[in-house]
Image: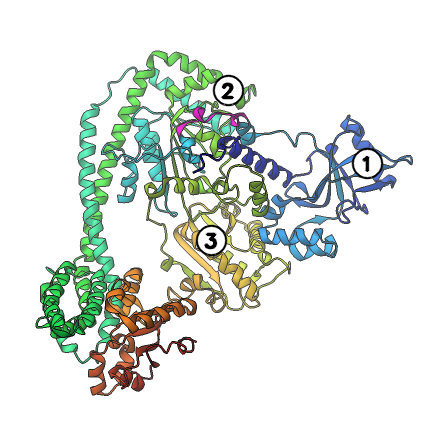
């Protein structure tokens, strides 16, 4: 055996990861260049017959004085002569007040041989397409940008004006060129600068939080704590998270409305009450009032205005502490004991409520299943016997009936059919043992005693077959009885008791948090004058326009942090205020962690001992200027390490945190809005327009846009001021913004005009936060193409996510007839009923008394894989194996010894003559072939025994394909499954 080991990577994993992210950030800057706002720092070349970009030439000579004179004047203003690197862009688009080159390249300038001429040389520099503008402002998708780029670079592609006309709609383009210097564009800023400083840190210098996040250190098992604070009432899911507040790395996922922000506030309260320092990053940049009233020790950063306002508030708090004098904090142990007692009571009530809800949901879910089972047995010859058996089910024994017992029954019956065929003296002796073996197997499966068949082996085998056929009825009846125990009044009662206890505990915990603040005040009192001086000095420097936030002294920040241990920021850009020191904070909490990329997250994580990430795992990251293709190229340049799990454009801190946490990840299940409550507005006569024929994303529907705005005005009139508009099509987003601006201009009431101007309009792939009401325009009406329908179908999850952000009203505007063709949205359009749900073909789970969620038990019941080896022997097993090989290729499922009454279904069974119905009850064909998706019976297959058996006669009468295959005659099997 070779003792050679693969060489260790020469580049540490952390260094490789940071270099990769720095290259992504640098590349984003290159792909999002803007023209300098200062007219003196650029030169616009109007009407230039340029060649460097449209014709991909490497050199062009500018000799027209109308162009050379502005260039020479610009160079004189620049004061650096003709040296250095310049950016040359064409054409120009207007993005707000800024000019943006759609395509640009680096060039050098040289004086021409003729007087008053300038030579521009591109050399080997690539053409840089402004992905930031095309993606975020123009609204093109990554695929559309890739195709636009391909056509632009193609020698056979159309001219730029024609090409851009096919992809860009509503964009102000001017076909002029621009020239400006590259100075300042290459300097690292923000997270890129911080990552540059952290790049060479050794593994042992990194905090545990970063090592856990990158996978270089395992995640310890989180220990639960009974002593937690919930200053805001918490439900059972949130309590489960709060019990883990001391975990070194905690990831919490939940949809909009599940209580993530409240959970974050409670987690911060736990840490603050324990005297720990906390950094909280949340998009709205604030904590709830309940927290601030109990614990004023909070600093707000993120902008100079926020910082200055926070400092003034901090000074007021400190001066009030100095004026009030020392106050004795309340007894902490008594409050803690009361809080723990309430926590125990809350756990009990949550468990009781969960049981009531589970039973009620089971009862509701079983209603259609039970109706299907009852109807399917109307013409069964043994219906009276089944009813007699079902009549013995009571509330006391209903819990003994479980779905997995149907699987056990099928497997036991298959084995028993094989035992019945054992012959000879040894076989008869074996059959005597099989009787007790059947009894033992039924007891082991937990099937109630009154269901057990009696008699010799033959009678027991017959009884097992009938019991299997009756079990869907027994199971559905038992589960309906259980569901009746979760009555609505009991659910409401337990929910009300749990909510009251949660409010009571929140009140006690706010007193605990207040006591912690009083202890903090007593702690800082000896240094109160020093801290006041630090705050006053910082306020004066800010008001005088003195030192910037970035040079806030570490000592001054340490003084502030001693008195105000909770720091809140709306962004991850904290470097201007918070020193870059490892483990400065005991806890870092990031809300909406799916909305940010990883590079700016890492320097903040470096500052924390523990971390909590909260977000919506179905949420989307902000559109990146990089794009997946460029990201893949940069990933491919990384040597020695596979960084696919950290892909810049695909993986957010939340998704990486979920991967790290694995089974320790916590999930919240609440939501603002149920899909069935969405209001659908049908716009039948709306026409879909494609102003940019090559870009589906630019589709518009003017009539539907007006219908959406009408809904907005009605919501405003109903008193809802926080309304948002959304559309999956960027073209419709632009149109909605234009119409909304015109509507606001025409509005005479200034308050209403202001409300209209404040309404945000989102694209579906943009992060969308909580709003009172959300109106979504789906665009596709008459004129929708198959491609556009597929395009919208691919973004249906984003539409559902947008609707889920509505806390009070969710409105969907579209054309019913068109949108019903999109399965994921058809339920919303058709009032919650999809075409697939309306079809119940084949042996679906409901036909066997099972719920749709019990698909594994359903498939195991049909195929009985664990019993095949014992139940099928010799030629039977050979036939099964050969059919199984063919079934894998034909998308079919094999069900051995399936009751023929199940295969026939209620309609075929009812159509049979009485004597054939009797035969069907005791028929269990060798193999039934089912369609793998619909479970529709395709054929019944048995070994040819010379004379047709009862199954053959029944199938012939019922019109069900039947095939008798002779032993060894396997050639015809392929035709059988065609």
Whether 266 is drawn above or below 561: the answer is below
Outermost residue on the right side: it is 114
Q: CA distance from mark 2 to mark 3?
A: 42 Å
Indicate left or right for 68 with 966 as reference: right
Question: Badges 3 and 1: C-beta atoms under 8 Å apart?
Answer: no
Specify whether residue 931 is in view: no
Residue 552, disc: 2
At which x and y percent is residue 267? 33, 34
* Discs 2/3, front: 3
Residue 70, disc: 1
> Which range of residues does the magenta coloring cover?
197-208
Q: Quadrant of the N terminus?
A: top left
Indicate left or right for 465 with 954 as reference: left
Residue at the disc numbered 3: 798
Whether 520 is drawn above or below 604: the answer is above
At which x and y percent is residue 156? 74, 57
């Amino acid at each position: 055996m070779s003792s050679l080991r693969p060489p260790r990577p020469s580049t540490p994993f952390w260094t490789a990861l940071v270099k990769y992210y720095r290259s992504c950030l640098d590349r984003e800057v290159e792909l999002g260049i803007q023209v300098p706002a200062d007219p003196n720092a650029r030169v616009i070349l109007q009407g230039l017959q340029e060649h460097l970009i449209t014709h991909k030439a490497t050199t062009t000579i500018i000799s027209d004085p109308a162009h050379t004179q502005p260039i020479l004047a610009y160079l004189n203003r620049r004061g650096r002569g003709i040296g250095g690197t310049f950016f040359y862009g064409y054409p120009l688009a207007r993005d707000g007040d800024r000019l943006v080159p759609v395509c640009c390249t680096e060039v050098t300038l040289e004086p021409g041989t003729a007087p008053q001429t300038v030579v521009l040389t591109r050399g080997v520099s690539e053409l840089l397409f402004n992905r930031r503008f095309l993606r975020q402002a123009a609204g093109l998708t990554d695929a559309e940008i890739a195709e636009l780029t391909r056509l632009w670079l193609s020698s056979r592609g159309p001219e730029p004006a024609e090409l851009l006309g096919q992809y860009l709609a509503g964009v102000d383009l001017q076909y002029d060129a621009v020239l400006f210097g590259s100075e300042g564009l290459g300097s690292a800023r923000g997270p890129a600068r911080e990552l540059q400083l952290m790049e060479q840190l050794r593994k042992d210098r990194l905090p545990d939080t970063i090592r856990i996040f990158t996978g270089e250190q395992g995640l310890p098992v989180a220990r639960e704590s009974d002593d937690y604070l919930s200053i805001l009432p918490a439900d059972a899911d949130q309590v489960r998270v709060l019990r883990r507040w001391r975990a070194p790395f905690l990831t919490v996922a939940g949809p909009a409305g599940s209580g993530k922000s409240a959970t974050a506030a409670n987690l911060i309260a736990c840490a603050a009450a324990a005297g720990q320092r906390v950094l909280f990053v949340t998009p709205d940049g604030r904590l709830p009032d309940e927290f601030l009233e109990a614990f004023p020790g909070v600093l707000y950063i993120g902008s100079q205005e926020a910082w200055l306002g926070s400092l003034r508030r901090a000074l007021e708090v400190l001066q009030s502490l100095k004026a009030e004098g020392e106050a004795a904090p309340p007894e902490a142990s008594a409050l803690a004991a009361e809080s723990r007692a309430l926590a125990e009571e809350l756990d009990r009530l949550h468990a009781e409520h969960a049981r009531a809800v589970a039973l009620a949901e089971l009862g509701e879910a079983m209603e259609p299943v039970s109706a299907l089972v009852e109807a399917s047995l109307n013409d069964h010859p043994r219906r009276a016997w089944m009813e007699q058996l079902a009549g013995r089910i009571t509330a006391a024994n209903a819990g003994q009936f479980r779905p997995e017992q149907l699987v056990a029954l099928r497997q036991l019956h298959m084995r028993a059919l094989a035992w019945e065929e054992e012959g000879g003296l040894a076989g008869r002796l074996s059959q005597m043992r099989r009787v007790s073996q059947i009894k033992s197997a039924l007891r082991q499966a937990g099937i109630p005693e009154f269901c057990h068949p009696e008699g010799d082996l033959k009678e027991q085998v017959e009884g097992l077959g009938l019991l299997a056929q009756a079990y869907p009825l027994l199971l559905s009846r038992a589960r309906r009885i259980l569901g009746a125990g979760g009555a609505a009044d009991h659910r409401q009662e337990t929910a009300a008791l749990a909510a009251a206890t949660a409010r009571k505990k929140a009140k006690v915990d706010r007193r605990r948090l207040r006591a912690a603040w009083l202890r903090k005040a007593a702690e800082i009192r000896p240094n109160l004058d020093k801290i006041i001086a630090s705050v006053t000095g910082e306020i004066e420097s800010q008001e005088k326009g003195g030192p910037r936030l970035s040079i806030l002294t570490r000592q001054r920040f340490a003084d502030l942090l001693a008195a105000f241990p909770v720091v809140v920021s709306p962004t991850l850009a904290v470097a201007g205020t918070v020193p870059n020191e490892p483990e400065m904070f005991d806890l870092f909490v990031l809300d909406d962690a799916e909305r940010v990329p990883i590079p700016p997250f890492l320097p903040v994580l470096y500052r924390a001992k523990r971390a909590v990430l909260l977000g919506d795992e179905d949420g989307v990251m902000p559109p990146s200027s990089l794009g997946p293709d460029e990201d893949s190229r940069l990933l491919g340049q990384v040597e020695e390490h596979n960084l696919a799990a950290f892909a810049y454009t695909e993986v957010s801190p939340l998704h990486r945190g979920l991967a790290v946490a694995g089974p320790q990840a916590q999930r919240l299940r609440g939501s603002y809005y149920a899909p069935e409550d969405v209001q659908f507005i049908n716009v039948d006569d709306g026409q879909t327009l494609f102003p940019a024929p090559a870009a589906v994303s630019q589709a518009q529907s003017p009539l539907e846009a007006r219908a959406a705005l009408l809904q907005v005005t009605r919501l405003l009139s109903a008193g809802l001021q926080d309304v948002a508009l959304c559309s999956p099509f960027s073209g419709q987003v632009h149109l909605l913004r234009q119409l909304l601006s015109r509507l606001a201009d025409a509005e005479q009431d200034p308050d209403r005009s202001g409300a209209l101007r404040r309404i945000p309009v989102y694209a579906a792939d943009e992060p969308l936060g909580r709003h009172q009401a959300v109106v979504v325009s789906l665009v596709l009406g008459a004129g929708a193409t198959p491609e556009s329908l597929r395009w919208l179908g691919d973004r249906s999850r984003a539409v559902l996510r947008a609707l889920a952000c509505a806390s009070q009203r969710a409105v969907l505007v579209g054309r019913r007839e068109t949108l019903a063709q999109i399965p994921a949205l058809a339920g919303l359009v058709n009032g919650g009923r999809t075409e697939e749900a309306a079809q119940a073909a084949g042996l679906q789970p409901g036909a066997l008394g099972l719920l749709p969620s019990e698909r594994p038990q359903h498939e195991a019941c049909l195929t009985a894989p664990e019993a095949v080896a014992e139940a099928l022997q010799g030629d039977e097993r050979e036939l099964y194996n050969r059919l199984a090989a063919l079934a894998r290729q034909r998308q079919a499922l094999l069900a051995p010894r399936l009751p023929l009454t199940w295969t026939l279904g209620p309609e075929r069974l009812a159509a049979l003559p009485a004597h054939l119905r009797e035969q069907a009850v005791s028929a269990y064909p060798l193999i039934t072939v089912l369609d793998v998706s619909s479970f529709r019976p395709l054929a019944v297959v048995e070994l040819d025994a010379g004379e047709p058996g009862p199954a053959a006669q029944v199938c012939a009468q019922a019109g069900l394909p039947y095939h008798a295959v002779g032993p060894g005659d396997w050639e015809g099997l392929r035709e059988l499954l065609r």
